[in-house]
Amino acid sequence: MNEKRFVLSSLLILFGINFIGLVSAQFYRGYSLSDLLNTFDSSTVILTSIFLIAFILIFWPLSKFFRENALLAGIISFAMSFLLIFEINRRGLDFAGFFYNIGISGGILYTILPLVLIIGLIFSGFKYGWGITLTSVGLFFIGISFTDIIYEKGITFILGFILLSIGIWLWIRRRKKSGFTGSYYQNHDNSYGPSPRQVYKQQKVQQRYQQKLEDQRRRGELTQQKHQQNLAERERQARETKIRRRAGKIAKIRTRREKAEQASQKERNKRYQKSL
């Protein structure tokens, strides 16, 4: 299942690059992939990498919090990541100069950062779903096309629009075809059904849920038993108290009778002595 999604996404990305190449051919005498990459300077690549890293780090805890609404977590993550790079760009921080000062040349940046971007996109696609990933990247490209970060704004806008359309299409297709709406699979693209790994995770979730219900039932039974024991103990104490009170009353009555008998015996003795 994952292989099919990966092949589909790769073909769509290659189609987008070729489409942009056809558009950019109007501005360049010759078209090649290097011409397209040369339109992005090191600052753009660095900002894009920061955006992707921030998006993944923000989306991960939000997806745990909004379990039933991954789209909301994606929108919030995109907004926060975009605000972060917007503020960085507004302050004019020179990341290329920073890397150059620590001994990393621009050529190395152009080699490493695209690999970081590709690995990050693949990780985000498999981890959080290709629909959310492509939608976020498309919105990001559309957003930066209205700024002065890049030179070819039209090409970037078209690329962002294509990725946004593909991401929305994948997300809607997953929503329609997935039979696990409202469950764990809402956080993933399941255009071809759940993968064995997702089924295993869902089984683990159900097992933990059943175990939790069983623990709650056992705690309820223990609480009920303790409550019944407390009631029985209170009843026993009440019976013992009643018995002690009754025994005390009997002892008082017996004492009064003995005193009365002693007084009566003394009175009879006095009368007998007087009669003598």
Image (cartoon, grey):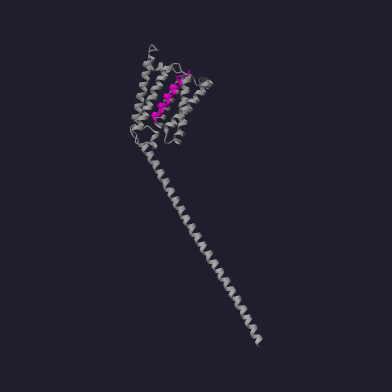
Q: Position of residue 173 (x, y in %)?
A: 35, 30
Q: How many marks?
A: 0
Q: Position of residue 146 (x, y in %)?
A: 46, 19
Considering every residue shown, the one lying at the far bottom of the view is: 276
274 and 64: which is toward the camera: 274
Q: Position of residue 109 (x, y in %)?
A: 47, 21
| Relative horizontal placement of residue 275, taking residue 136 as reference (left or right) | right
Q: Is residue 179 above or below residue 42?
A: below
| Relative horizontal placement of residue 31, taking residue 240 as reference (left or right) | left
Provide the major secondary structure of the magenta segment. Answer: helix
Q: Residue at x 39, y 42 (%)?
A: 206
Q: Is residue 245 visible?
A: yes
Q: Is residue 120 magenta?
A: no
Q: Is residue 252 above or below residue 192?
A: below
Residue 205 lies in what quarter of the image? top left
Q: Is residue 147 magenta?
A: yes
Q: Is residue 108 visible?
A: no
* Stretch of the chain drawn in magenta: 129-148
Q: Position of residue 244 (x, y in %)?
A: 54, 66
Q: Is residue 66 above or below residue 135?
A: below
